[in-house]
Image (spheres, rainbow, N blue to C red):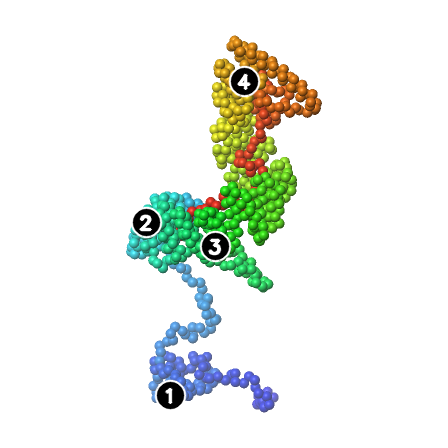
């Protein structure tokens, strides 16, 4: 049955094509699987007679079909493509020699039976690298060179961080190691293989660090080493830095010499550097007063590559020689200098595209935008300063000059500066004490845009506040706030007007709003501290002043207020500590010194109190309070002769006050100079004939000395005492029983001493000291009445007594900066 089935063959279906037919048909020429068993092929490989000519496409039908092998049996030999016998074939009994010896680096048998491994991973790990010898000279040189580079980098980083001493030490260390490196390299290699770039960088960094530490002689020597070495290319540029050092040393002739040498060695293609060097030359000429040479340099710069600094310095030079027309032309050139910045419209989104808005938001305050703002601010500063400088001199009057500048600015790209110039014109009127013209000028801005209107109204409010016209000041402060609610100066001035009316809570609200709009508004922060002090909220006041002290480290006003708050909080040690800081800032402030002396006096330290009171008297010898304390101190220490000069000065300051002259006479009497005391009392009696104390002492001295005038003075004394009793009875009958009489001040030192109300405060303390001195049982001392002294006035003027005003434009903004020096032209 099985035998029968083997002979049965199924006929293929003729109506359907075989989809997989032809896949097993291939050219037998490419059958390489059985080449090892092909005797003829192996014979051709082993012999040199099987060389075949290259197969070309020019000979048709060169390939000879080969029957498909079905096993390891015999095969038909392949024919040559050119009709020649195959390699290893036997023809006519002769075996054809082999064509090649062996395949180039590849054998089929070597790969048979091995896994596919194109990367050679089965070969195992690579052998370890040969260890580098650290003792070799080349390796030592390489490591030393790396260390020198690291030291140079560390020196530059320390310099950028402000640690100049560390930067110099690193630079010196790098120089020492670099010299060791050069010696080692000379021993190993030829001299031409020395790293000149490393030597140059080490020397240049060392010179830069010397210059930064103001060791100018060492810096110049190091620069000379670089410049004189012909192997360094472009070393002549460093003469610019040498010129800058000579300029700092005020050696202007050498500075100009080195600048010109550098200018000669720099090719004309480096136009920007040449312009900077010429600008430094012009500045140096201004320093030496050679304005004509400076003008030549700046004129050349403005014709080749105009810039703001050169234009401003050109105006200064023409101002120095007084050339009005040239000043005008130079100002027009300064106005025409291109800023080369983008317009603000670029940062306004033209559509609602979120991607565009995101990009605009990202670039609105990036570093490039900040640089553009700084450049624009600098340009406005130069233009405003130049206009304020030349306006008073280019025309017959400063008003006409300002008008010309305003017209020029309006026709330029700085249109917004015209209004600021008008406000500066008003401030100039203020300096000339022409308040009416200043007010008229500022009132012109009431119909302009809100920003300018707010600025003008702020200044008007400031002016009226200074003149104590608080109603007008409040009106213009309201106008300024309504025009620009986010103007901190307007809010501060509004708070000041409310403060002046005594509404401290409302004033504090305005100051707080000003601080919310601008946290750096120091006027508002200072005034809110004063407000809290008025409201007796001392902790909050102290907090405000301490915050302000962190912003204004050396502000005498802030230091005094902190000391005053501590004094009100009954902490005299802290108050004295802050007053000591105040004196370190303003060592000649007599009121601060007397205040500190008073604190030491209250603490019982008389020696320290005397020191500060004496220093206060030395700087301001007209303070009655200090004079009185010093006189009392000398009387207390039994040096009456020294007290005389202080009371004599007090009598010169207050000639209508009889008590100072009585104190002078008393000092003469205590020191034993009775004749001088008698003459002084007689002189006092001629000036003040109704003074009872003077007559009493005249009677007493005349009696002791035995003079005949005693009866005359006794009669006058009785008559005055009787008149005094009659006057007291009239006053007593006409006053209420509960009140304290307001008697007539007759200038006497002891009149009505038992009836007058006593004065409080420090004046009462000092009078008590005088009454407690030895021998005070005498009438004029026991009944002396001291006028109430004014409370301590803060050391720095009216700002302490009332809140600070916040004028939009300050009076000191016209301080113009003269020429500016260029920076070092090479990076350090």
Is 820 above or below relative to 678? below
- The residue to which callout 3 is attached is 408
Mark 4 vs mark 3, CA separation in Å:
74 Å
Mark 4 vs mark 1, CA separation in Å:
163 Å
Q: Earlier in the sequence, mark 4 or mark 3?
A: 3
Q: Earlier in the sequence, mark 1 or mark 2?
A: 1
Q: Percent x, y for residue 172?
A: 37, 46
Callouts 1 and 3 close, C-beta under 8 Å: no
Using a 10 Å C-alpha cutoff, classify the residue at mark 4 as few (fewer than 14 neighbours), some (14 to 19) or many (20 or more): some
The answer to which of 338 and 565 lies nearer the viewer is 338
Is 111 above or below relative to 445? below
The answer to which of 579 and 793 lies nearer the viewer is 793
Q: Earlier in the sequence, mark 4 or mark 1?
A: 1
Mark 2 vs mark 3, CA separation in Å:
39 Å
Is 742 above or below relative to 147? above
Q: Nearer the viewer, mark 2 or mark 3?
A: 3
Name the residue rendered at 42%, 86% in the picture. 63
Q: Earlier in the sequence, mark 4 or mark 2?
A: 2
- Horizontal relation, residue 263 to residue 416: left or right: left
Name the residue rendered at 65%, 19% in the picture. 728
Mark 1 vs mark 3, CA separation in Å:
103 Å
- The residue to which callout 2 is attached is 257
- The residue to which callout 1 is attached is 83
The answer to which of 693 and 32 lies nearer the viewer is 693
- Horizontal relation, residue 686 to residue 150: left or right: right
Secondary element under disc 2, as helix, strand or loop, is: helix
- The residue to which callout 4 is attached is 685
């Amino acid at each position: 049955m099985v035998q029968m089935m083997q002979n049965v063959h199924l006929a293929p279906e003729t109506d359907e094509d075989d989809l997989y037919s032809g896949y097993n048909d291939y050219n037998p020429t490419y059958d390489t699987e059985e080449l090892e068993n092909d005797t003829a092929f192996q014979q051709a490989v082993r012999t040199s007679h099987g060389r075949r000519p290259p197969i070309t496409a020019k000979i048709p039908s060169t390939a000879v079909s080969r029957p498909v092998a079905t096993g390891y049996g015999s095969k038909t030999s392949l024919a040559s493509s050119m009709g020649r016998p195959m390699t290893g074939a036997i023809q006519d009994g002769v075996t054809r020699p082999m064509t090649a010896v062996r395949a180039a680096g590849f054998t089929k048998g070597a790969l048979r039976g091995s896994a596919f491994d194109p990367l050679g991973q089965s070969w195992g790990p690579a052998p370890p690298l040969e260890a580098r010898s650290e003792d070799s000279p080349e390796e030592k040189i390489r490591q030393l060179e790396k260390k020198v580079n690291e030291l140079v980098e560390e020196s530059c980083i320390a310099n950028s961080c402000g640690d100049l001493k560390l930067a110099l030490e690193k630079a010196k260390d790098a120089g020492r190691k670099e010299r060791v490196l050069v010696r080692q390299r000379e021993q190993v290699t030829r001299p031409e293989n020395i790293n000149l770039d490393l030597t140059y960088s080490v020397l240049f960094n060392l010179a830069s660090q010397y210059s930064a530490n103001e060791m100018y002689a060492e810096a110049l020597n190091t620069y000379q080493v670089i410049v004189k070495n012909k192997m360094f290319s472009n070393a002549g540029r460093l003469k610019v830095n040498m010129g800058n050092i000579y300029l700092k040393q005020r050696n202007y002739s050498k500075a100009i010499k080195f600048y010109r040498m550098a200018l000669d060695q720099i090719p004309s293609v480096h136009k920007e550097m040449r312009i900077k060097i010429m600008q430094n030359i012009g500045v140096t000429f201004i320093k030496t007063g050679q304005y004509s040479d400076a003008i030549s340099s700046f004129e050349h710069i403005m014709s080749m590559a105009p810039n703001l600094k050169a234009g401003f310095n050109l105006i200064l030079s023409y101002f120095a020689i007084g050339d009005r027309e040239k000043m005008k032309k130079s100002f027009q050139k300064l106005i025409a200098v291109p800023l080369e910045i983008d317009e603000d419209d670029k940062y306004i989104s033209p559509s609602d595209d979120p991607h565009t808005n995101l990009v605009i938001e990202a670039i609105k305050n990036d570093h490039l935008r900040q640089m553009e703002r700084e450049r624009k601010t600098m340009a406005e500063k130069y233009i405003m300063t130049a206009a304020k400088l030349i306006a008073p001199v280019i025309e017959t009057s400063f008003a006409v000059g300002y008008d010309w500048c305003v017209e020029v600015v309006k026709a330029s790209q700085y249109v917004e500066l015209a209004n600021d110039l008008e406000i500066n014109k008003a401030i100039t009127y203020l300096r000339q004490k022409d308040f009416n013209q200043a007010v008229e000028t500022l009132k012109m801005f009431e119909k302009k845009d809100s920003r300018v209107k707010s600025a003008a109204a702020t200044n008007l409010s400031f002016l009226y506040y200074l003149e104590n016209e608080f109603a007008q000041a409040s009106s213009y402060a309201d106008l300024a706030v309504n025009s620009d609610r986010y103007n901190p100066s307007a809010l501060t001035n509004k708070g000041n007007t409310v403060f002046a009316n005594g509404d401290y809570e409302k004033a504090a609200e305005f100051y707080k709003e000003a601080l919310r709009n601008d946290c750096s508004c120091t006027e508002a922060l200072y005034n809110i501290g004063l407000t809290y002090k008025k409201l007796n909220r001392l902790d909050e006041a102290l907090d405000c002043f301490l915050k302000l002290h962190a912003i204004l480290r050396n502000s005498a006003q802030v230091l005094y207020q902190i000391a005053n708050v501590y004094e009100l909080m009954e902490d005299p040690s802290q108050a004295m500590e802050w007053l000591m800081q105040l004196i370190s800032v303003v060592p000649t402030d007599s009121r601060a010194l007397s205040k500190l002396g008073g604190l030491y006096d209250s603490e019982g330290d008389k020696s320290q109190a005397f020191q500060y009171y004496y220093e206060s008297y030395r700087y301001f010898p007209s303070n009655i309070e200090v004079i009185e304390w010093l006189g009392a101190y000398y009387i207390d220490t039994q040096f009456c002769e020294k007290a005389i000069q202080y009371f004599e000065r007090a009598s010169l300051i207050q000639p209508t006050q009889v008590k100072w002259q009585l104190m002078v006479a008393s000092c003469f009497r205590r020191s034993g100079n009775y004749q001088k005391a008698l003459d002084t009392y007689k002189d006092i009696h001629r000036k003040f004939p109704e003074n009872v104390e003077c007559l009493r002492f005249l009677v007493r001295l005349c009696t002791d000395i035995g003079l005949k005038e005693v009866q005359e003075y006794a009669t006058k004394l009785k008559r005055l005492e009787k008149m005094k009793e009659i006057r007291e009875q009239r006053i007593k009958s006409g006053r209420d029983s509960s009140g304290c009489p307001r008697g007539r001040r007759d200038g006497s030192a002891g009149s009505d001493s038992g009836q007058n109300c006593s004065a409080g405060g420090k004046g009462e303390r000092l009078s008590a000291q005088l009454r407690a001195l030895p021998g005070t049982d005498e009438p004029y001392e026991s009944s002396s009445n001291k006028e109430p002294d004014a409370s301590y006035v803060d050391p720095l003027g009216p700002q302490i007594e009332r809140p600070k005003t916040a004028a939009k434009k300050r009076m000191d903004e016209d301080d113009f900066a003269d020429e500016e020096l260029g920076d070092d032209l090479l990076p350090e």
